[in-house]
Image (cartoon, coloured by chain):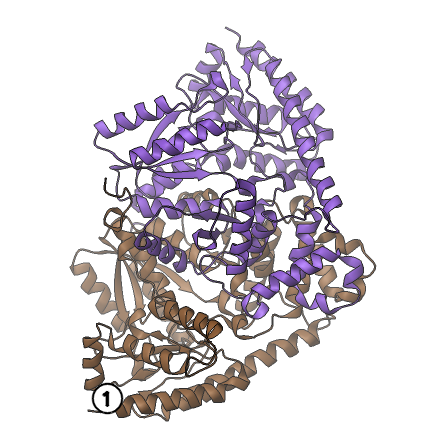
Chain colours: A brown, B purple
Amino acid sequence: MAPSVAVENLNPKVLKCEYAVRGEIVIHAQRLQQQLQTQPGSLPFDEILYCNIGNPQSLGQQPVTFFREVLALCDHPSLLEKEETKSLFSADAISRAKRILSTIPGRATGAYSHSQGIKGLRDAIAAGIALRDGFPANADDIFVTDGASPGVHMMMQLLLRDEKDGILCPIPQYPLYSASIALHGGTLIPYYLDEKTGWGLEISELKKQLEDARSKGIDVRALVVINPGNPTGQVLAEDNQCDIVRFCKNEGLVLLADESVSKGYYGECGKRGGYMEITGFSASVREQVYKIASVNLCSNITGQILASLIMNPPKEGDESYAAYKAEKDGILQSLARRAKALEDAFNNLEGISCNKAEGAMYLFPQIHLPQKAIEAAKAAKKAPDAFYALRLLEATGIVVVPGSGFGQVPGTWHIRCTILPQEDKIPAVITRFKAFHEAFMAEYRD
Amino acid sequence: MAPSVAVENLNPKVLKCEYAVRGEIVIHAQRLQQQLQTQPGSLPFDEILYCNIGNPQSLGQQPVTFFREVLALCDHPSLLEKEETKSLFSADAISRAKRILSTIPGRATGAYSHSQGIKGLRDAIAAGIALRDGFPANADDIFVTDGASPGVHMMMQLLLRDEKDGILCPIPQYPLYSASIALHGGTLIPYYLDEKTGWGLEISELKKQLEDARSKGIDVRALVVINPGNPTGQVLAEDNQCDIVRFCKNEGLVLLADESVSKGYYGECGKRGGYMEITGFSASVREQVYKIASVNLCSNITGQILASLIMNPPKEGDESYAAYKAEKDGILQSLARRAKALEDAFNNLEGISCNKAEGAMYLFPQIHLPQKAIEAAKAAKKAPDAFYALRLLEATGIVVVPGSGFGQVPGTWHIRCTILPQEDKIPAVITRFKAFHEAFMAEYRD
């Protein structure tokens, strides 16, 4: 009997879905890491440097103390009754934990919550949004989620009926979108960001792609905006953002604004906290969103608490404020220095041009590959940028993601490289990268 | 212009999906709870008792101390360097936290992990499974998830191509399965549990429903077994389990065994920790599972740590063992007393019969509704058991889920009621339920 489950009889949407951020190159990197452990000295480098994924704490960034103090107290509330706790935790972490517990029915941090998240935490998130944006936000519009991915999947599930439904996505784009659209059976309608103007988003390009899709009979349901850009790192100007909102309103598109809260300076990726704010839907559509959320019961409470903390960090006058501000400024200033050092290094190399990382932890340099390298890649059955990234990994231990995983203007080749290795390692990263790139160009120069 | 997003143009699979556990009755209960706050004394009861959902900590159950000690230390690892910590935490919680942190690359509890979960934690989970079952388990087969729901969705997404693909599910069933099958566009093939034999699972019934589905051209991909039963509370005999495995092997069905680890006595529902063990799939199918998991990056680290703790609680000789055992035994013995008290109370009422809760926190009594009540329900456009549950809520504040939310033999009516109200409240629950039921029967007696 043939096996009852084989690749041939799986859901074809699953087979179609691609996700390069954790694809072939990362799996190869994990193999090399094991080799370094079992046979030290057997490779031309002594550690793997994961620049493929925006995962600051995996590369040594320390969590913000205040956030972790509050999480620990909420996880083990009986600490709040002990005298020693006062010397171990800051006073405002203690009072914040008490306040959070008082908003949770039964102070139960191990109970399922409301499917949109604990009401008191959503109130805090809404207040944080209002303070940041100067525009009111409502807790009833907030859905707290296990990071960004479930929110994206939920909206795709809601909007996509079949392959005649389309979603406008930036190219290059973070492949969660292309993966989710493939999994839910819709069609990705690309719009290109303009590399020459620092990955600018032109309304004329949106219009052109929208009309082109409509002329092919696609019902375009939504526009995805990723700001700050991923993998491209740019920040949209406020005027540009207003134009995008107006465009969506005029064209009847849902605006999916991925503002990457989960990718802030604090880098708490593994806690899987995030939120989605929904506005402009009718009550009956909202009920459907709530129903899908309720099938999964609720998101994890630790992530919910963390999302509320991130949106309401210590304020001036709080005991923790000085320490919090020093930690935050330290991280942000160091990230800025690292971004600049790597950007300059890329721009100083033959055949590489790199835009600024204005607000994200990514650089997306273009690699002008010689024809000979492109042919060598073809012979190896790899995309040219994947070929380059694999050679980079094997020579240096540096892991990056080929631009073909995000989409790019045909005939151009990029890599996405995070700026996250700790600052004392950046000079070595640059030296190793430079040596590799020069050798690669020497080998393949036309 | 018509609104661009309306119920009429949403994904019809979303509209088809139903999820009664958080449906109409719960929303009504939340409204009544608000009314109790704003107008105390305006209802015939002074609190809402949520017996609709297996959520022990929301009803006052305290978390296991050891688990929470370890979570707090992992959330805020710098505690491990402080002298005061030794007097606040047990020695084995401290050593366990140290051991866990040593298995996490960079000791980073805020970093994304491997998409299957942190390897060291999966090793611990596999060791726990092997110890429990006397059968080896492999960390590479474990996928740590944000609770059970994402695991179920992942398998449905993998297996279901269209409505010609079917999944055999018990009736009554926990509606996560029917909801997930609807969302992924497959067909639920029901097999009935036998209420007369304590919700027995008969292989002959499986065979009959499988053949019937196949004769209609359905490609039956998998069999769902929920053990202990949800909503039905029974535990399958070991012989019966062996027969089920053999049946799946012979018929080429994937066996989806929902063993409800996330629903253990510790009741840590809101932490969203769980795992899925996959065996018998080819490497190429496994790659597809990994790919879907990787699109969501990883499950929350707190839940991952908790899953490893639950599968490896303190052992004899550990400092925490006595306290841990006392907490665990206290919870389990109290649950058993509450289950028996409620079961007896149900069986003592006119027109109600109730099987034992052998291993779950649910009772699923059958309510033999008088014809007049059924007609009143019809007039109110409700399923008869939903009508009964709504009247129960309005009279007593007790929230239960109507059997029609889980499926039941046509013409029979049930409610699912958890055994989770704290023990001192059980007599009042019974008194209030009895008074309501007797009045209801008096009102509608044929």
The amino acid beneath tag 1 is Tyr
Which residue in the protein does label 1 denote?
A444
Q: Nearer the viewer, residue A135 or B82?
A: B82
Q: Secondary structure at mark 1?
A: helix
Q: Nearer the viewer, residue A103 or A387?
A: A387
In the rendered image, the residue lying farthest to the left is: A216
- Where does the image place residue A254, in percent across and percent down from the top left? 35, 57
- Where does the image place residue B213, in percent across and percent down from the top left? 26, 29
- Residue A260, relative to residue A439: is it above or below? above
Label total for image: 1
Q: Looking at the image, which residue is at 16% across and 60% down?
A: A215
Q: Give the left or right position of residue B445, taking residue A45 as reference.
A: right
Q: Is residue A279 visible?
A: no
Q: Give the left or right position of residue A278, taking residue A14 as reference.
A: right
Q: Nearer the viewer, residue B253 or A314?
A: B253
Q: Give the left or right position of residue B411, taking residue B214 as reference.
A: right
Please give the chain letter of the residue carrying mark 1.
A
- Residue A30, relative to residue B402: is it above or below? below
In the rendered image, the residue lying farthest to the right is: A83
- Where does the image place residue A106, in percent across and percent down from the top left? 68, 44
- Residue A158, relative to residue B169: is it above or below? below
